[in-house]
């Protein structure tokens, strides 16, 4: 390696670490200030491992096939008095950084030996902002404790597997096979999609006369079967209202609509600023469009798989994997852009900086306001825990319609209802050690 190449590599590496460090610190702060809500409070039960495994076992047979997802969530929230929430916050921030890194690495063009394929500072910041703003409700999948374990973690793990597939280098060691099984047990539609991809990849390798990582593919498929064939899935399905295919299609189309909103505009402007035509020569055009076509196909197939699920189960967070594949399309166009010069380069830097400032200007006040409301409720409720009393809290609503559901791009939080028998209220009261809790207007 030439001295100039070595200097360029070391400089890019420092810039990459700096960008990821900034993302980690922001993500850690956001995780710390985001309060528990909804299912989180329901799982802050007294520490009893025997009871925890009994509950998770019962869920697998009578409610959901997400055995390891549920187990990890219970363990994180059950040991909250022993600092488990902070450990989760650190781990979750690291997982988010790994997701950003995975997107950068999977989108770069490694076919040209003369091209610098390291992810630069601007690349990482652009991908981070796209991951935060393109999905409909990032708070549900990146900050909510229950949601992050069930969505952010599997998307990060399965995207790493997709990286190996596109690089044609599936591992086959014991740890890798165990990881393949483990990550395949988290999220049903994504697990099925990746098993389909792995099977197709294995068939392709076999036809070409190349080695097939059968153990890795087999263990991932086994994890998918463990998830999909859980008795609890079918018990739960019988409790839901019967859906027609038209009704399900309408629900999926609604979710597809949620993938595209006005938050796309600034990122498209940035790409136009880079001249979206990634490169001029036809060979690299072909490579870029092939990768873009792959991500587009994966997003479409994933959304089609959602037709297998009742409409009532299609929350916005379910479309998160499809959003990440769409982010990969934007990242492919951005990371493999022609190197801008002069005024265009300064405009690109200003655009990225503007997006980052806008991000902080929106997110920080929202999350601090949410943390203030939660701290107020916790403080006022805890004052009555010694006497196991009924507690009345001031009702806090959001927006001109005075909704109890606080929804913004980076917050989704359920307020305290006036009904003390509401599930959220019951779980909150039990977690804080009071008899009941409800809200009234101040």
Image (cartoon, helix red, strand yellow):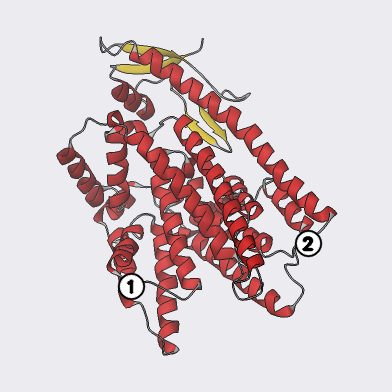
Task: State the residue at coordinates (61%, 76%).
Answer: 111
Q: Position of residue 75 (x, y in %)?
A: 27, 40
Q: Earlier in the sequence, mark 2 or mark 1?
A: 1
The label on residue 275 is 2
Q: Give the quadrant of residue 87.
A: top left
Q: Secondary structure at mark 2?
A: loop
Q: How many residues crowd mark 2 within 10 Å: few (<14), some (14–19), many (20+)?
A: some
Vertical side of 354 occupied by 223: above or below: below
Vertical side of 377 occupied by 188: above or below: below
Task: State the residue at coordinates (70%, 47%).
Answer: 352
Residue 384 seen in the figure: yes
Q: Secondary structure at mark 1?
A: loop
Task: State the residue at coordinates (36%, 20%).
Answer: 420
Of residue 244 and residue 145, the one placed in the foreground of this image is 145
Vertical side of 30 occupied by 198: above or below: below
**Left-right relation of 267 to 96:** right
In the image, farthest residue toward the right: 343
Q: How many residues crowd mark 1 within 10 Å: few (<14), some (14–19), many (20+)?
A: some
Of residue 140 and residue 19, the one placed in the foreground of this image is 19
**Left-right relation of 144 to 232:** right
The label on residue 272 is none
Q: How many marks?
A: 2
Q: Give the quadrant of residue 55.
A: top left
In the image, farthest residue toward the left: 50
> Which residue matches tag 1?
172
Quadrant where the image shows the N terminus: bottom right
């Amino acid at each position: 390696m030439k001295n100039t190449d070595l200097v360029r590599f070391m400089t890019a590496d420092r810039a990459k670490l700096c960008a990821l460090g900034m993302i980690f610190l922001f993500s850690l702060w956001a995780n710390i200030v985001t309060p528990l809500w909804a299912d989180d409070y329901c799982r802050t039960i007294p520490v009893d491992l025997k009871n925890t495994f009994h509950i998770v076992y019962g869920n697998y047979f009578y409610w959901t096939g997400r055995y390891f997802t549920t187990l990890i969530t219970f363990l994180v929230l059950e040991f909250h008095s022993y600092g488990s929430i902070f450990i989760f916050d650190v781990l979750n921030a690291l997982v988010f950084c790994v997701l950003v890194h995975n997107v950068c690495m999977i989108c770069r063009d490694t076919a040209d030996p003369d091209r610098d394929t390291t992810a630069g500072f601007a690349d990482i910041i652009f991908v981070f902002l796209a991951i935060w703003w393109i999905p409909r409700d990032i708070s549900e999948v990146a900050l909510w404790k229950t949601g992050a374990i069930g969505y952010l973690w599997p998307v990060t793990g399965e995207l790493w597997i997709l990286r190996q597939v596109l690089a044609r280098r599936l591992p086959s060691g014991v740890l890798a096979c165990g990881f393949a099984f483990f990550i395949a047990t988290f999220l049903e539609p994504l697990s099925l999609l990746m098993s389909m991809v792995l099977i197709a990849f294995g068939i392709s390798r076999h036809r070409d006369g190349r080695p097939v990582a059968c153990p890795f593919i087999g263990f991932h498929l086994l994890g998918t079967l463990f998830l999909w064939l859980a008795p609890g899935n079918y018990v739960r399905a019988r409790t839901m209202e019967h859906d027609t295919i038209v009704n399900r299609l309408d629900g999926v189309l609604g979710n597809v609509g949620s993938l595209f909103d006005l938050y796309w505009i600034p990122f498209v402007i940035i790409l136009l600023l880079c001249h979206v035509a990634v490169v001029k020569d036809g060979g690299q055009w072909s490579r870029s469009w092939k990768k873009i076509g792959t991500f587009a196909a994966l997003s479409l197939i994933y959304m089609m798989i959602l037709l297998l699920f009742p409409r009532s189960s299609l929350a916005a967070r379910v479309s998160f994997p499809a959003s990440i594949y769409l982010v990969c399309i934007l990242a492919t166009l951005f990371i493999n852009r022609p190197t801008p010069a002069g005024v265009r380069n300064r405009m690109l830097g200003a655009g990225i900086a503007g997006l980052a400032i806008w991000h902080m200007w929106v997110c920080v006040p929202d999350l601090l306001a949410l943390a203030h409301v939660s701290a107020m409720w916790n403080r006022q409720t805890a004052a009555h825990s010694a006497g196991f009393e009924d507690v009345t809290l001031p009702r806090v609503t959001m927006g001109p319609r005075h909704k109890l559901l606080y929804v913004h791009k980076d917050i989704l939080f359920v307020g305290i209802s006036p009904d003390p028998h509401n599930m959220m209220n019951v779980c909150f009261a039990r977690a804080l050690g009071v008899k009941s809790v409800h809200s009234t207007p101040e």
